[in-house]
Amino acid sequence: MDKPTSLAQLREVTQPPEVRTRANAEHWVAHLYLRDFSPYVTWVLLKTPISANGVTALMILTGWATAAALLIPGIWGPILALMLGQLQMLIDCCDGEVARWRKTKSPAGHFLDAVGHYTTEALIPIALGLRAAGFADNSRPINWMWVALGAFLAIVIILNKVLNDLVRVARAMSDLPKLADAKGANAPRPGMVAKLRRMARFVPFHRIYHSVELTIIAFIAMLVGVFIGQLLVSQILVAVLLPLSILAIIGHFVAIMTSSRVRAA
């Protein structure tokens, strides 16, 4: 397909209503502001020979750099991680836009996109565990207990993400149609779980385990660490995130089992 002649044309093709109104696949920062900026970046990318999968590879590397930035001592590491986390989500918007404009959407692209998000959201808690262990402080030995807790946090976060993929696999194996990605489409059936889920909207701790949210939380925590100590606040952060993540995965599992997603039509 030829290069776009205007930003309006580019938005029309690469940001159709079914993309802008996605309830789950579209992150809130994309809804809020990144989709307003991404066409400018996509415009530049379309002037280069880089493929949509090549853009996704940049997204993956940016995500890994986000986690690595958290290993930088002091407040500067979390500041850099915060910026890189936003950049990763911006590039994540652009790879799909490049694919939609060039009509090169493929299973490989979806696979690489998942690899990027899964690995980033596993590496960030590991990096937080290393911070809590004193990795960035050469004056003291590493406390491997915190490294282990960070790794355990990573496992729980990934398992939570896997649940959504397992729903798709289960539906495909049962010859059920693809789930609609619309608000309310995957809500639990009426009952106690549905009430609890509505209450969780006011304190959505189950949503804090995406890369963007984790970098925001890490940045805020390290701001507090300027006053009470970076090591202490890092340990508090991991100690709080771990039990909440276990609670989140239990709630996620119950929500799935009580919803229509895993019920025969």
Image: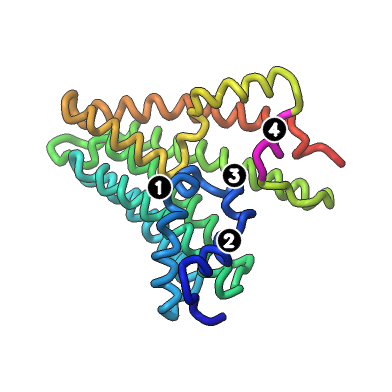
The structure residue drawn at horizontal position 29% and vertical position 32%, both measured from the top left corner, is 220
- Between disc 4 and disc 1, the foreground one is 4
Q: Which residues are magenta?
A: 182-188
Residue 155: image location, x then y, percent: 50, 40
Q: Nearer the viewer, residue 245 or 199?
A: 199
Q: Amino acid at mark 1?
A: Leu
- Between disc 3 and disc 2, the foreground one is 3
Say the numbered circle drawn on residue 24. 3
Whole-angstrom CA distance, mark 1 to mark 2, is 18 Å
- Between disc 1 and disc 2, the foreground one is 2
Give yes or no for residue 184 being in the magenta stretch.
Answer: yes
Q: Which badge, 3 or 2, comes first in the chain's sequence?
A: 3
Q: Nearer the viewer, residue 194 or 183?
A: 183
Instruction: Identify whether 47 is placed above or below 171.
Output: below
Q: Which residue is mark 1?
A: 123
Element under label 2? helix
Q: Which residue is mark 2?
A: 111
Element under label 1? helix
Element under label 4? loop
Whole-angstrom CA distance, mark 4 to mark 2, is 26 Å
